Image (tube, helix red, strand yellow):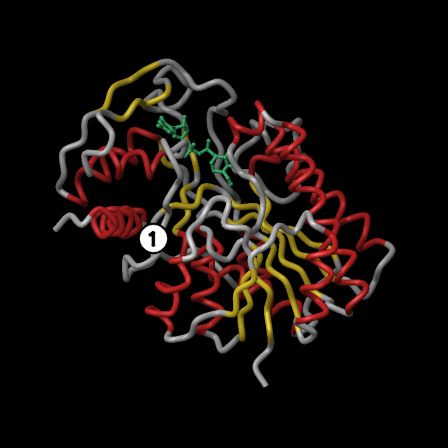
Amino acid sequence: MAKQILVTGGTGYIGSHTVVELQGKGFDVVVVDDLSNSQITVLDNIEKITGIRPAFEQFNLADRDKTDAFFQKYSNIEAIIHFAAFKAVGESVQKPLEYYRNNLTSLMNLLECMNKYGVKHMVFSSSCTVYGQPDVLPVTEETPRKEAESPYGNTKAICEDIMRDYCATNDKINCIALRYFNPIGAHPTALIGELPVGVPNNLVPFITQTAAGLREELSIFGDDYDTPDGTAIRDYINVVDLAEAHVVAINRMLDEKQKANYEFFNVGTGSGYSVNELVQAFIKVNKVDLKYKIVGRRHGDIEKIWADTSYGNKELGWSASRTLEETLESAWKWEKNVRGIE
Ligand code: WQD
């Protein structure tokens, strides 16, 4: 009997890619999503890729009664991968209470239901944003967390603390937090990818929409940072590499290989690229023109961050394998498919 995995936020960007990888490994996937930031048609495209349409329930996990009813209906869930959260940095500054209520309550409802219904394992979508601007680079899992740059980032740090404290007194519950660096790219079929609602906040979708003619020009936020070319540095990880890391984390728990019942891992490539390097790589690999200009820094941005991935590489037996070039190619192929560009 295939093991059943609940993927919350499974019609979202990283969630959908993780559903594809889980199904590819023989897991039976159930998706819960409130569709506040994604489309139901993502399920059609998952089915086109894997031949399997995941079971789907639409509700918000901050609703305790609906979450409880879900676990009464789906009584064979072995593990949860929890992506569902509000995630717009800027919006979180404007609407902090909505972010705290949604992101924290959803997690607490899931943890309580795990205890009540005997679901033992959870992989949690965390973020390198918990490190703030590190004093020392690259960041390891020992690097101290810093004051979050936004309410969004703070919800990730608080959720990590909730899992740590809950696992400390509930030895039947196992959690792994994966601290993502910057996920980019799309599935090689170009059937699923990043589809931000409205004007993209993130760099790569803004680049691909500019190349597709939806945006007039890319603004590069600052070239006066203390970096080789003055633009900010990030650790950009291919979304399929990231999805694969979730399957590895699930198997670590199912195979009872955890060293403790709460663990966290950096999930990056270990390499940092500047905004300018990424822009030039996109232009070169996709042979496209791209209008861009340098403007002032964006409020809240950090200067540079990239991961030391050695702990995760060793403990999880996982490392990112896809190159920046093939990742940027996949991003452009996806954008062209969405916009009907040859
Ligand atoms: C990357 C770099 C920008 C847009 C955020 C969240 C993080 C995660 C990923 C959710 C920065 C520059 C961007 C543009 C630009 N979110 N940039 N022009 O800010 O590193 O991380 O998104 O999980 O938690 O903090 O990602 O893609 O927004 O920016 O110059 O139009 O690109 O200044 O240096 P970021 P990003």
**Left or right: 202 in relation to 134:** left
Which residue does the image show at 40% across and 42% down from the upper left? Answer: 236
Q: Where is residue 19 in the image (x, y as percent from the top left)?
A: 47, 64
Q: Position of residue 147 (x, y in %)?
A: 66, 26
Viewer-proximal residue among 80 and 233: 80
Quadrant hosting ligand 1: top left
Q: Residues within 10 Å of mark 1 (few under 14, many from 20)?
A: many
**Left or right: 239 in relation to 246:** left
Q: In this view, does 262 lie above or below 48?
A: above
Which residue does the image show at 30% across and 59% down from the upper left? Answer: 191
Quarter of the image for the N terminus: give it. bottom right
Q: Position of residue 325 (x, y in %)?
A: 26, 48
Which residue does the image show at 47% across and 58% down from the upper left? Answer: 243
Picture mark count:
1
Q: Is residue 336 above or below residue 301?
A: below
What kind of residue is marked 1?
Ala
Which residue does the image show at 63% across and 29% down from the upper left? Answer: 151
Determine which residue is flagged by label 1: 186
